[in-house]
Amino acid sequence: MTKRRSKGDGGLHWDARRQRWIATLTVGYTPAGSASSRQAAERLKTEAKNKLKEIVRDYEDGLTTVPGDYTVEQAVMDWLTYGLSGRAQSTVDLYATECQKHIIPALGKRKLRELRTEDVDKWLAARAKTLSTRTLQIIRSCLSRAVKRAMARDRVKRNVVELCGVTAGKEGRQSKAMTYAQADAVLRAAEGTGMHAYIVLSLLTGARTEELRALIWDHVDLTGLPNADPPVPPYMAVWRSVRAGGDTKTRKSRRTLALPKRCVDVLRGLQGIQRKAQGDSWKTSGLVFASTAGTELDAANVRRALRNVIKDADGLNPKEWTPRELRHSFVSLLSDNGLPLEEISRLVGHSSTATTEAVYRKQIRPVVQSGAVAMDHIFRL
């Protein structure tokens, strides 16, 4: 006589019609009171027993509603569809592109519950041969967050991606800074173009391109309060960016910058051009730098317009420069002229000088000269 299985161990029987061994486990009850079960069919009894053990393990781990064929691709697509609410569309597009290009083709068909650390390690190692370290960090993060979301919904027991580190990838494109002569050549080439004011502000204030694209006239004062005590110079308030929600990158990125005279002059000129072209409605959109439709400038269009200017500047290859390197040039020029790192950090809106040193280490003057200069003054020869 066949021994009856204990309660909670599930059942195993032969289905003559299907010619399969059927593993069955009751995993709960519906609101109507009927039993809810998980089943698996296998040709061999041993395989059915193993499948039943797997179902029991899932039940004990709380994974009672997970389809056995739930894949990495499904987890990633669920995360892209429902896990990125509130993110900027540009961020969503970036993540979707990286997932479709690097994650789904390599790991998408793998059942999520069968994904192992070895799979992730091999995948990252293979991608490290062609991708930069930054891109590797992005795709690992996307996969990890997709698995974490699935884990929170009882579709997998643990997130194996978190156990895998990112190896160094190919060296990415290094940012660089313009010399004074190169910056001056770019400023000259920009005169008379639609990018003139944008380039001047970027190069002379160090504002991020995302901050300039969101700058509004209400945050610009071209007169200041010269008779106040102390006097208030012309300024622009960097309080917005094109990021989701309009916030700046960090809390300390929200800053108010005095405007050099050259910036004041080009902005007054820009106001005159906008008034002439748009009449009394010139300030309707509020944007200092706007497209012909009155909307925020697109990052790709700004990059293209900058390179069109640079191609007319002597000694510069337009393909080698991007808008963010105007900010790098701002840091480099100030450092070369002896401005302390603490002041540069405040001007560019960094939370600390450590951030400035890490991001702009190639633009910061490497030799600290103030001690030597002071000692030469003290101990005159």
Image (cartoon, rainbow, N blue to C red):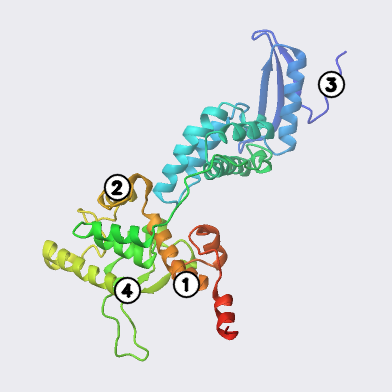
Taking the spot 44% from the left edge, 47% from the top edge, the residue there is 91
Q: Secondary structure at mark 4?
A: loop
Q: Which residue is mark 2?
A: 304
Q: Are marks 4 and 3 in contact (CB under 8 Å)?
A: no
On screen, residue 376 versus residue 344, left or right, reads right
Q: Amino acid at mark 2?
A: Arg
**Alpha carbon separation for disc pair 4 and 3:** 88 Å
Displayed quadrant of residue 206: bottom left
Mark sitting earlier along the chain (1/2):
2
Q: Secondary structure at mark 2?
A: helix
- Tag shown at residue 260: 4
Q: Are marks 4 and 2 in contact (CB under 8 Å)?
A: no
Q: Secondary structure at mark 1?
A: loop
On screen, residue 291 versus residue 256, left or right, reads left
Q: Secondary structure at mark 3?
A: loop
Q: Residues within 10 Å of mark 2 (few under 14, many from 20)?
A: some
**Alpha carbon separation for disc pair 2 and 3:** 75 Å
Q: Which residue is mark 1?
A: 338
**Alpha carbon separation for disc pair 4 and 2:** 26 Å
Of badges 1 and 2, nearer the viewer stands 1
Mark sitting earlier along the chain (4/2):
4
In-front residue for pair 247/164: 164
Q: Amino acid at mark 4?
A: Pro
Coordinates of residue 353 in the picture (x, y in percent): 55, 67
Q: Which residue is mark 3?
A: 4
